Amino acid sequence: MPAILAATVAEVRAALADFRRRGQLVGLVPTMGALHAGHAALIERARRECGCMAVSIFVNPIQFDRREDYEAYAIRLPDDVALCESLGTDVIFAPAAEEMYPAPQSVFVEVAGLTDHLCGRFRPGHFRGVATVVAKLFHIVAPHRAYFGEKDAQQLAVIQRMVADLNMPVEIVPVATVRDPDGLAVSSRNRRLSPEERRAAPALFQALQAAAQAVASGARSAAEAKAAALAVLEACPEIRVEYLEVVDPATMAPVEQISGPVRIAAAVWLGATRLIDNLYCPAVAR
Ligand code: AMP
């Protein structure tokens, strides 16, 4: 079935109004396009759960801390539309930047605390841009449910907190990280890796697994878990570590002692490409 392709706020609202009149549950999958198997997992889950499934495709300029990163971001709208249609998407919202930001934005959503660490520390303004555009998308689409990947665990936590603190009537549905067979989390950035960098990249997941294994075997200090992960990463000269942290999953703040569930999160550089990944470690009975 062809999807309805909406480029303006008025068009997407009109398209969704028909579904709403028929009493359909509206699900939204926000993306920046260049769709891959990770996005497909979100779309398939939304398709199963919602009578009306919408995908937004918008490369959000205000979440990029580096202009060249925004300009280099791949745009593949015809391929994305084809994938969305093959997965049964009802409505695709693909606005131009001028449609989302007809004038410079002066209202922003800041999620304090949760954004002090991990990516928030290294990408100033990034989560403010993400929370602001997601808030705008929620106002435009008014979904009952919205789907986000655990691959971006800090982003997921930021959106959950925004929705709770601002009483937004939308249920946030987390979706597990989709990985290539060698463990590398699927990402649109993986396409930028050289063949050598691609060969080295699974070390990121292997490092997180080594830390998770240390936690599961009883490591009580974050330093011990981090050392297990760093040993894996340090064996790869192609990889530069930006951060590697053991954090409290609720606050995203680094912990020193491991006494409950933790998330191990890392960002690394391979050449000019930055990759992130994380693993949840449940509490271990001690
Ligand atoms: P992006 O287009 O990169 O902004 O991502 C859009 C959504 O897809 C976000 O909720 C991401 O967390 C999610 N996502 C990206 N990669 C993956 C993956 N490998 N597995 C699951 N979800 C993902």
Image: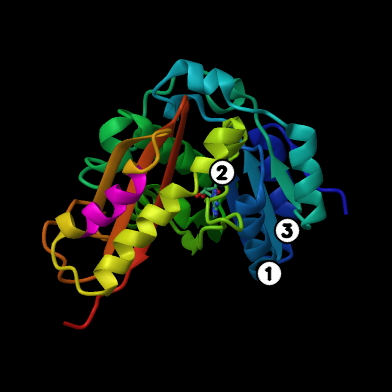
Q: Quadrant of residue 129?
A: top left
Q: Earlier in the sequence, mark 1 or mark 2?
A: 1
Q: Residue furthest bottom?
A: 285
Indicate the amino acid at tag 1: Arg
Work out which quarter of the rendered image holds the C terminus and state it: bottom left
Ligand 1 closer than 8 Å to label 2 CB: yes
The spot of residue 202 in percent (x, y) is 49, 49
Secondary element under disc 2, as helix, strand or loop, is: loop
Foreground disc of the pair 2, 3: 2
User: Which residues make up the magenta segment?
Assistant: 225-233
- In reply to whether residue 231 is colored magenta, the answer given is yes
Q: Nearer the viewer, residue 25 or 67?
A: 67
Please, what is the three-letter code of the amino acid marked with disc 3? Phe
Q: Is residue 20 visible?
A: no
Q: Residues within 10 Å of mark 2 (few under 14, many from 20)?
A: many
Residue corresponding to mark 2: 187
Q: Nearer the viewer, residue 40 or 159?
A: 40
Residue 280 appears in the rendering: yes
Question: Is residue 70 depicted above or below 89 in this figure?
Answer: above
Mark-to-mark CA distance, 2 and 3:
32 Å
